[in-house]
């Protein structure tokens, strides 16, 4: 082989080697970039905080709270009172236990409602329903008393 053929062959091999190396390097960079994007997606914050009065950019405005409206005594019992009054926890009179409820109502239903609003013994004020109004508490007490006769 002549030296000019060797030069052409050497240059051709050098070009091919450069192209192959470039393909591998580009693939590695793209794979690394893709991996970094996947990691960023997995560790991104679950939510964002926007303080009222500040420009919050892309953060969506909070949805307006739905009006609670009146709740029945049964609804309140099932969602907030059942934990204790369904199981008798901490000495709470159980729904349906006529003896336990009649001992309490002997002082008058208003006294029982007052105790439920203000708390008594192990029961904290309003039980576990901090959002309940006095009327809500009265409805829940009436439900429990009516269903414990």
Image (cartoon, rainbow, N blue to C red):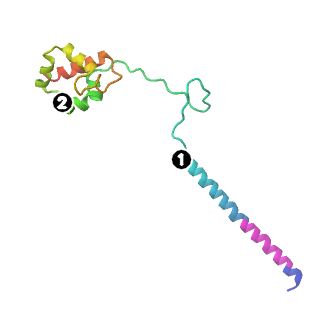
Q: Are marks 1 and 2 in contact (CB under 8 Å)?
A: no
First in sequence, mark 1 or 2: give its number: 1
The quarter holding residue 142 reads top left
Q: CA distance from mark 1 to mark 2?
A: 46 Å
Is residue 71 rendered magenta in the image?
A: no
**Residue 23 percent across, percent down from the top left:** 70, 64
**Residue 114 percent across, percent down from the top left:** 24, 16
**Residue 64 percent across, percent down from the top left:** 48, 23
| Residue on which disc 1 sits | 43
Q: Is residue 60 left or right of residue 66?
A: right
Q: Is residue 18 above or below residue 103?
A: below
Q: Is residue 36 left or right of residue 136?
A: right
For the N terminus, the quadrant is bottom right
Residue at coordinates 63% horizontally, 58% vertically from top-left? 31
Q: Is residue 3 left or right of residue 94?
A: right
**Residue 62 percent across, percent down from the top left:** 51, 27
The kind of secondary structure element at disc 2 is: helix
Which label sits on residue 91? 2
Q: Nearer the viewer, residue 29 or 23?
A: 29
The kind of secondary structure element at disc 1 is: helix
What stretch of residues is rendered in magenta?
7-21
Label 2 Cα neighbours within 10 Å, binned few <14 / some 14-19 / many ≥20: few
Q: Nearer the viewer, residue 12 or 33?
A: 33
């Amino acid at each position: 082989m002549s030296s000019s053929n060797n030069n052409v062959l050497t240059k051709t091999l050098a070009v091919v080697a450069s192209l192959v190396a470039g393909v591998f390097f580009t693939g590695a960079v793209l794979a690394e970039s893709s991996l970094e994007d996947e990691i960023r997606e997995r560790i991104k914050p679950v939510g964002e905080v926007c303080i009222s009065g500040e420009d919050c950019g892309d953060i969506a405005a909070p949805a307006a709270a739905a009006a609670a409206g009146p709740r029945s005594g049964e609804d309140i019992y099932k969602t907030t009172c059942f934990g204790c009054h369904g199981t008798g926890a901490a000495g709470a009179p159980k729904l349906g236990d006529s003896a336990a409820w009649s001992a309490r109502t002997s002082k008058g239903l208003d006294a029982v409602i007052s105790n439920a609003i203000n708390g008594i013994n192990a029961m904290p004020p309003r039980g576990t329903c901090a959002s309940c109004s006095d009327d809500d508490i009265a409805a829940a007490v009436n439900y429990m008393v009516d269903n414990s006769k």
